[in-house]
Image: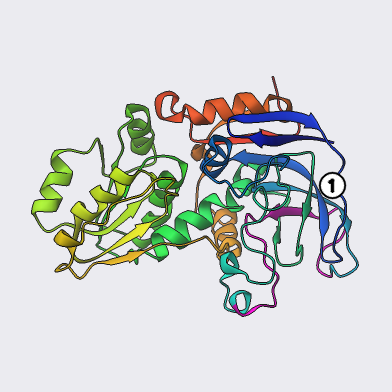
Amino acid sequence: MRALVYHGPAQTSWDTVPDAVIEEASDAIVRVDAATVCGTDLHIRQGDLPGVKPGTILGHEAVGEVVEIGGQVHHLRTGDQVIVSSVSACGDCPECRNARYGQCCGGGGWILGNLVNGTQAELVRVPFADHSTTRRPYDLALDDAVLLAELLPTAYEVGVRNGHVCPGDTVVVVGAGPVGLATVVLARLYSPRRIIVVDLAEARLKAAARVGVDAAESPGKMIGDLSEGPGADVVIEASGDPDGFVLCTRAVRTGGHIANIGMHGKSATLHLESLWRKNVTISTGQVDTSSTSWLLALMRFGQLSVSRLVTHTFGFDRMEEAYEAFARGPSTGALKVVLHRVCSP
């Protein structure tokens, strides 16, 4: 099969590798019909995650067809269309029993494209397949379904839910990349008074305006007014930039919430000298994908429209080109980049 292989910092290639095979009785093999490029994949390619070993196939989000199952897989059959979760869940450990799948201590958690081979390939081995896949309805488009593998659950669980977004809130989202804009779409479900998006890139501020924010701006007067005035009820850090986190601490009101989604490859400063009196709650987290089925239902019944988040599609054989388009997203306006097994020219 063909796959995108990590060979070390700044070194990846679309290679011919041995086919994925069943290694444990709880595994399934899925033929990948659609996958994505994620910001975490960029961090890996840059060498920010030294735990990822050269020779690893990248990627942790996919949709495809089950082509083989292990002897202990009971809820899947060959031919099933599935969403492959970015998080693998053993289903038996204390964390999994409490739906904290991202913290699985039975061999799961975020392992695809990290500790084991991932989804940017023609075939992927899915560990703990019964607990790590969701059936894809045949009427749900691939480009919508693949957003349920990680992007939408992350925006909801780590951003909106951890941030306790409520009706009437002022919500600030720092970072207008795909996860930031997905957070905007999901926060709207809770009827906030207004949503403000902050980003340095003009192309992404325009994208934010298209998804229906109340204001989209570079860090400036509005954030200054918030920091010197009542502040925002909820501030969601979705940039992964240390300065973005500092901005969050400035914009949040006394008694408010900061929900950190962004993956920080560098140290971020926590200014306790200005926060210690503010009674602020700061949350971080690894996505659990426990909300996938609920989000899927919202999509199917027309309550959640996310197609506009997908801006670029590529065939598998253009994987490297897809990475470059995504990496240049702040200047090109690229948001979610989806890779298809078959893609129109």
Is 94 in front, or is 200? Answer: 94
For mark 1, does the 10 Å Cα neighbourhood hold few (<14), some (14 to 19), or many (20 or more) residues?
some
Is 144 in front, or is 30? Answer: 30
Q: Quick check: can you spot residue 53?
A: yes
Q: Residue furthest top?
A: 345
Image quadrant holding the N terminus, namely: top right
Percent x, y of residue 159: 40, 58
**Which residue occupies 17% across, 67% down?**
276
Residue 78 magenta: yes
Asked which quadrant contains residue 275, the reply is bottom left
Image quadrant holding the C terminus, namely: top right
Q: Residue furthest left?
A: 228
| Vertical comparison of 146 with 318: above or below | below
**Which residue occupies 86% across, 61% down?**
77
Residue 76 magenta: yes
Q: Quick check: can you spot residue 166?
A: no
Amino acid carrying label 1: it is Ala
The image's colour scheme reads rainbow
Percent x, y of residue 49: 55, 46
* Residue 203 shown left or right of residue 34 in the figure: left
**Pointer 1: what residue?**
20
Asked which quadrant contains residue 295, the reply is bottom right
Q: What stretch of residues is rendered in magenta?
A: 74-94
Q: How would you classify the magenta stretch by its main secondary structure?
A: loop
Is 177 in front, or is 344? Answer: 177
| Vertical comparison of 72 with 259: above or below | below
Percent x, y of residue 95: 59, 75
Percent x, y of residue 284: 41, 62
Q: Secondary structure at mark 1?
A: loop
Is 161 in front, or is 239? Answer: 239
